[in-house]
């Protein structure tokens, strides 16, 4: 529907083709790590922010990052969705980091919608209906 954020038919089709109903992942973070949007957890080791991120699913990763870049081009609409206040990076490096962080959020939300069979922003939709 117009005015609602979503991952769209291309990403949702690619997600279903890759993971079915999403049952193979316990959390959205696990799905995002599998796609290549966050480093894998290394149990027993301290967190390393420079840890290598392996893109195991390059098509899904590219689609989520491109969707994030589209969202970043429209900051005036962020308040309409559940993205919160994302900082604006002036340098290309900062913008790319921000795009991957936002792609991670989109992937987690997409997995949650797929796995739990809910709408993107069900609470917001319910509040708007009242």
Image: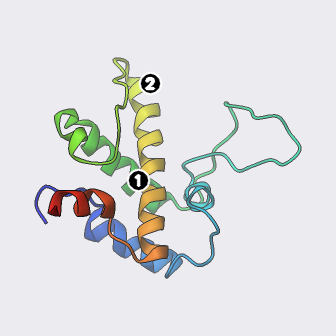
The residue carrying pointer 1 sits among few (fewer than 14), some (14 to 19) or many (20 or more) residues within 10 Å by Cα, namely many
Left/right of residue 72 with respect to residue 14 in the rendered view = left
Check the picture and name the quadrant holding the C terminus.
bottom left
- Residue 66 placement (x, y as % from top left): 33, 48
Residue 69 is drawn in which quadrant?
Answer: top left
Please provide percent x and percent y for residue 45: 86, 39
Residue 47: percent from the left, percent from the top? 76, 35
Q: Residue furthest top?
A: 90
> Number of marks in the image?
2
Q: Position of residue 50 (x, y in %)?
A: 67, 31
Q: Nearer the viewer, residue 4 or 40?
A: 4
Q: Secondary structure at mark 1?
A: helix
Q: How is the image coloured?
A: rainbow
Q: Which residue is mark 1?
A: 106
Nearer the observer, 70 or 55 = 70
Q: Circle 2 is placed at which residue position?
A: 93
Local packing at callout 2 (Cα closer than 10 Å; few below 14, some 14-19, many 20+) is few
Mark 1 to mark 2: distance in Å?
A: 20 Å
| SS at mark 2 in the image | helix
x 21%, y 45%: residue: 80
At a point 38% along the width and 24% down the height, the residue shown is: 92
- For the N terminus, the quadrant is bottom left
Tag in front: 1 or 2: 1
Please, which residue is most extreme toward the right here? 44
Instruction: Tell which of 82 and 38 is nearer to you.
Output: 82
Mark toward the start of the polypeptide (1 vs 2):
2
Q: What residue is at 25 percent from the left and 40 percent from the top? A: 78
In this view, 34 is above or below 95: below
State left or right for residue 65 relative to residue 3.
right
């Amino acid at each position: 529907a117009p005015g609602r954020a979503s991952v769209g038919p291309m990403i949702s089709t690619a997600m279903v083709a890759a993971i079915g109903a999403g049952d193979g992942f316990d959390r959205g973070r696990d799905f995002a790590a599998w796609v290549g949007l966050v480093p894998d957890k290394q149990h027993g080791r301290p967190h390393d922010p420079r840890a290598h991120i392996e893109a195991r699913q390059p098509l899904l990763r590219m689609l989520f990052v491109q969707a994030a870049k589209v969202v970043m081009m429209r900051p005036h609409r962020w308040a309409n969705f559940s993205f919160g206040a994302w900082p604006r990076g002036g340098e290309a490096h900062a913008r790319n980091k921000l795009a991957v962080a936002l792609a991670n959020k989109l992937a987690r939300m997409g997995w949650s919608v797929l796995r739990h069979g809910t709408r993107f922003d069900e609470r917001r939709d319910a509040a708007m209906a009242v």
